[in-house]
Amino acid sequence: MNTITINDKSARARVASDIVLVNGWAITSALGPVDLENDRTPLPEGVEAQTRKILSNLETILRAAGLTRDNVVAVRVYLVEAPRLLERMNAAYNGFFRADRLPARSLVGATWLTRGAQVEMDFVLNSQGT
């Protein structure tokens, strides 16, 4: 098992790796809209900006792991106030993945997320090819 942590001094690094690679698979968990280099930075305002930040964080983590968004096979979205925010979150999410390579996706309504975020995501990746 290999692990990658972007900032080993972050609060997150004390409890989890940013990505775990094992047997051809890679997994992220509870990836939020934090600044990976400085987790004390305030979260972006609004679910759209938070969604874009998560996807930007994913890109950073994927580069560190030698992977691309084409390796993503599944996404689990955790969203507070899902009935109210889903359309807005989708507006920021849509277009990130190629239309011919959309990963499976599930949505989980949440009452609270880390640091009061409106959205977090988990990603499952196949690290042995696209």
Image (spheres, rainbow, N blue to C red):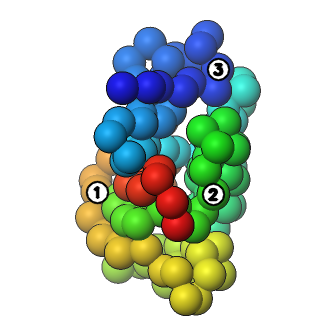
In the picture, measured across the screen, residue 58 lies left or right of residue 41, that is left
Separation (CA) of disc 1 from disc 3: 27 Å
Q: Is residue 81 visible?
A: no
The percent coordinates of residue 42 (x first, y second) are 68, 36
Looking at the image, which residue sits at the far bottom?
100
Residue 68 badge: 2
Position in image of residue 115 (x %, y %)? 48, 35
Q: Which residue is depicted at the point 64% across and 26% down? A: 6
Disc number placed over residue 7 in the picture, else none: 3
Q: Residue at x 60, y 62 (%)?
A: 69
- SS state under label 1: strand
Secondary structure at badge 3 equals loop
Mark closer to the chain start, 3 or 2: 3
Name the residue nearer the viewer: 52 or 130.
Answer: 130
Location of mark 1 (residue): 110
Q: Residues within 10 Å of mark 2 (few under 14, many from 20)?
A: some
Closer mark to the observer between disc 3 and disc 2: 2
